[in-house]
Amino acid sequence: MSTDQRDRLLSRDVTASQIPSGEKHALAAGTQVFIHQVLGGSYTVQTDTGLYRLDGKDADAIGEQVADQQVKADTLADGSPDPEAVWAQLRQVFDPEIPVNIVDLGLVYTMDISKQDDGGHRVDVQMTLTAPGCGMGPVIAEDAKGKILLVPGVSAADVRITWDPPWNQSMISEEGKMKLGLI
């Protein structure tokens, strides 16, 4: 095995999403992985069979500490979730091939919070992807939903992918463009 700190052996079996198809695959304990990037609590790793996205809950399998996912935010006076906390969580979601979060990439079109009949609060997000046919879309949407559900006051979340309007590079924030070297 290489002496590179990013080269690891899986200590246990994990289920990972193959990049770019998004298909779930079992990776066996003892599989050698190379960590390409760590963003938003997930890991993009390479094996001899391709690239995969490991969820943060599986960080221990590559010798990393599982991060505390507790969101430090208060609900508003009426008990509803703080919209800024929801946006902060969305900024923790990344396409595993692009080192810019989905908000700064301009992929999130809308985020709405509504009160439900049971008194809880629901967050609905409309987002897109950089390219139709991206197999990682459902994985990214599920990651966003999971992070939104961690916000105090959120009892339900739905993240939908839309293609209208089509995404283009002009939707990337200034910060995102700087990170990608576009300005």
Image (cartoon, rainbow, N blue to C red):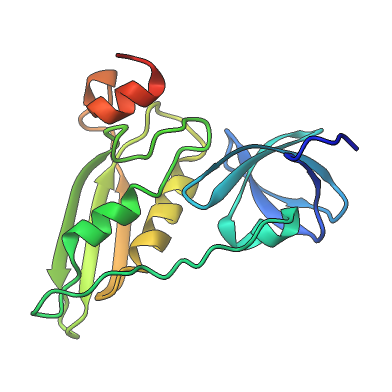
Q: Is residue 87 left or right of residue 145?
A: left
In depth, the one of 64 and 122 nearer the eye is 64
The residue sitting at 25% across, 47% down in the picture is 126
Callout count: 0
Pick the residue in front: 81 or 113: 81
Residue located 85% across and 36% down the image? 3
Instruction: Quarter of the image for the C terminus: give it.
Output: top left
Q: Position of residue 82 (x, y in %)?
A: 18, 66
The residue sitting at 26% across, 59% down in the picture is: 86
Q: Quadrant of the N terminus?
A: top right
Quarter of the image where one finds residue 145? bottom left
Q: Quadrant of residue 108?
A: top left
Q: Is residue 172 visible?
A: no
Q: Is residue 148 visible?
A: yes
* x 33%, y 56%: residue: 89
Q: Is residue 135 left or right of residue 58?
A: left
* Residue 111: percent from left, percent from top: 19, 52
Query: x%, y% of residue 48?
Result: 82, 33
Please determine whether, in this image, residue 38 is positioned above or below residue 51: below
Furthest-top residue in this view: 183
Seen in the image, is 68 located left or right of residue 79?
A: right
Q: Give the farthest residue toward the left.
A: 78
**Residue farthest right in this picture:** 1
Residue 27 coordinates in the image, percent (x, y): 78, 51
Q: Is residue 122 above or below residue 147?
A: below
